[in-house]
Image (cartoon, rainbow, N blue to C red):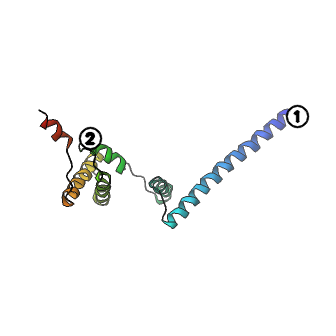
Amino acid sequence: MFDVIRCTGAIVASWARRHRYRCGVSLGRWTRAWRYGAGRLSADEAQRLMLDCRYPAGWHPLLVLTVEDTLEQARQEIADHPDLSRLVADGCARVGDKWEPYCGELLEARCWAINLAKNYAADEGITFVLLNDEHDSDR
């Protein structure tokens, strides 16, 4: 008798956990949709929204160019500057619209975005200090 009660209790608990999880996921999606409609998405929410739409759209990219990764790579080459993240984001936006990978050169896409950020900085009169130049001037 206790086995039947325990088994039934486990089934009900499993059902409740599954539905609580599904309701939480649905609520998160509705919240992101509402914030998208209101124009108040954070960067993390926007990325999550893109991931939510990826499977229904049939979009399965192998390479993802992100501002964070490109900025991290740029900081290995360029000394930190207040405008660096904005210019790298602009470079990534342009590369993302124009890049056509043919052999998985994500590194090349990042380098292109960093070079665009340098060109944008030069156009705006911003001077970046290249880390290699700092090391070479010490010699």
Mark 1 crowdedness (10 Å alpha carbons): few <14, some 14-19, many ≥20: few
| Residue 1, image x, y percentages | 88, 34
Residue farthest along the right direction in this orientation? 1
Q: Is residue 34 above or below residue 73?
A: below
What element does badge 2 sit on? loop
Residue identified by numbered label 1: 1
Q: Is residue 28 above or below residue 129?
A: below
Residue at horizontal 13%, vertical 37%?
A: 136
Residue farthest along the bottom direction in this orientation? 37
Q: Quadrant of residue 139?
A: top left
Residue at horizontal 84%, vertical 37%?
A: 5
Q: Is residue 108 left or right of residue 13?
A: left
| Residue 67, image x, y percentages | 35, 51
Q: Quadrant of residue 17?
A: top right
Return the disc, 1 or 2, that comes first in the chain's sequence.
1
Residue identified by numbered label 2: 76
| Residue 23, image x, y percentages | 65, 53
- Determine if residue 63 is in view: no
Q: Is residue 68 left or right of residue 36?
A: left
